[in-house]
């Protein structure tokens, strides 16, 4: 009487685990300026320091990329479309209200 032995199942080698990619600061614009954590700090700082450059666009939607205005229009979709045609991947868009002499803004 012959006894047949079952072949042992091969154990698979463990797969090497991928290391998480090191987080890099997000780039603002094509000019290579970095925004730490991707919060568009370059654009925010520029807008706070240079409000006079945004005044001509009061009442319009404006796309800011790095330290310059890339597109503007009374229609948000048109401003985004123009910015994307000019190479902006993720547009940073905001609406600039017309100043009202009867309104006083305090704080935020």
Image (spheres, rainbow, N blue to C red):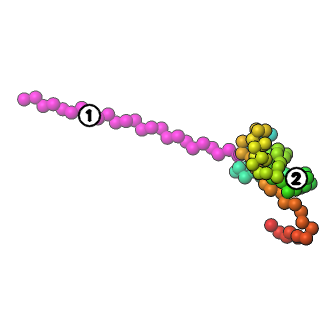
Find disc 2 in the rendering and name its residue: 57
Q: Viewed as shown, does residue 83 lie left or right of 58?
A: left
**What residue do we see at 83% from left, 69% from top?**
107
One can see residue 44 in this view: no
Quadrant occupied by the N terminus: top left
Q: CA distance from mark 1 to mark 2?
A: 75 Å
The answer to which quarter of the image holds residue 12 is top left
Question: Could you tell me residue 34's position as x and y percent?
Answer: 76, 45
One can see residue 97 in this view: yes
Above-or-below relation of 10 to 59: above
Region rendered in magenta:
1-26
**What residue do we see at 75% from left, 48% from top?**
77
Magenta highlight on residue 7 = yes
Find disc 1 in the rendering and name its residue: 8
**What residue do we see at 29% from left, 35% from top?**
9
Q: Viewed as shown, does residue 88 lie left or right of 100?
A: left
SS class, disc 1:
loop
Question: Could you tell me residue 40's position as x and y percent?
Answer: 75, 51
Question: Could you tell me residue 62's position as x and y percent?
Answer: 81, 51
Q: Viewed as shown, does residue 73 lie left or right of 21?
A: right
Mark nearest the camera among 1 and 2 is 2
Question: Could you tell me residue 69's position as x and y percent?
Answer: 84, 46
Q: Nearer the viewer, residue 39 or 68?
A: 68
Proximity of marks 1 and 2: CB atoms separated by less than 8 Å: no
Q: Which numbered tag is attached to residue 75?
A: none
């Amino acid at each position: 009487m012959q006894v047949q032995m079952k072949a042992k199942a091969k154990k698979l080698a463990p797969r090497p685990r991928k290391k998480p990619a090191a987080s890099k600061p997000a780039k603002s614009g094509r000019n290579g300026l970095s925004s730490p954590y991707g919060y568009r700090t370059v654009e925010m700082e520029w807008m706070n320091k240079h409000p006079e450059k945004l005044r001509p666009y009061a009442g319009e939607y404006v796309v800011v990329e790095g330290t310059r205005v890339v597109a503007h229009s009374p229609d948000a979709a048109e401003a985004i479309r123009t910015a994307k045609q000019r190479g902006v991947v993720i547009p940073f868009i905001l609406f600039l209200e017309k100043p009202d002499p009867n309104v006083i803004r305090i704080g935020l």
